[in-house]
Image: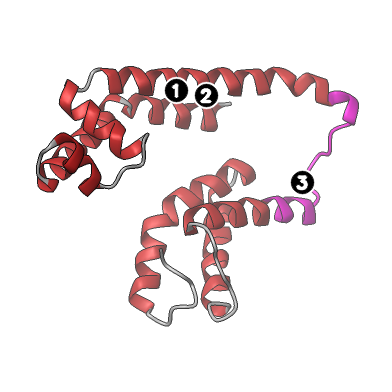
Amino acid sequence: MYQPNSIEPASFEELFRSHYSILCATAYFVLKDEDAAKDMVQDFFMYCWDKRNIIQITQNFRSYATRAVRNASLNYLKKNGKVVFNDPSDSMDQAPDLVDDRELEEQRHAALWAAIGRLPEQRRRIFLMSNRDELSYNDVAGKLNISVNTVKTQIKLAYQFLRKECEWMFIYILFLIFFK
């Protein structure tokens, strides 16, 4: 994982390129303003670059960046008086959203397991041993008496299949985010 305290501009640029669009979408979801969202993300990366000797990220960068951009966007709205704080009695109106989120999560979970179920038997077994049971490639190969390269190939093919099968979920989630 990349740590922002690295002095390598090339790796920082790669980090910027790989996360810029998702962070812009995160900021846009909060701000509802494309230019402000782009500015927010650029400010975040400038902050990371300026503070690269101080910032210590203990988890993955994407989670950190998403949370930071979201919070910065909320602070921007608050600072500019664009946030409407709801009365606590209104929180009951938001309860259906929690149910919808839970239902959506259950649907995604069921769809993912259905897609895993459509994998060829040997590929599914290898994939589950590696991911669900958290066995290393060497352990999977040893238990199934196959080569490590076969394990790697089968897992790669499983991920390709699952990405293709579950692509609709990603599109559906984006649809919900932008048109909610």
The dot on residue 105 is 2
Residue toward you, 34 or 161: 161
- Is 52 rendered above or below residue 24? below
Which stretch did the figure color magenta?
Answer: 74-90
- Is 175 rendered above or below residue 131? above
Disc 2 to disc 1: CB gap under 8 Å: yes
Q: Which residue is mark 1?
A: 108
Residue toward you, 161 or 178: 161
Mark 1 → mark 3, Cα distance in angstroms: 34 Å
Percent of width and height locating residue 59 = 52, 58
124 displayed left or right of 54: left
**Magenta span includes 21:** no
- What amino acid type is highlighted by mark number 3? Lys
Q: Which residue is mark 3?
A: 82
Which image quadrant is residue 12 in?
bottom left
Residue toward you, 129 or 75: 129
| Residue drawn at the location 84% of the way across and 39% of the way down | 85
124 displayed left or right of 84: left
114 displayed left or right of 156: right
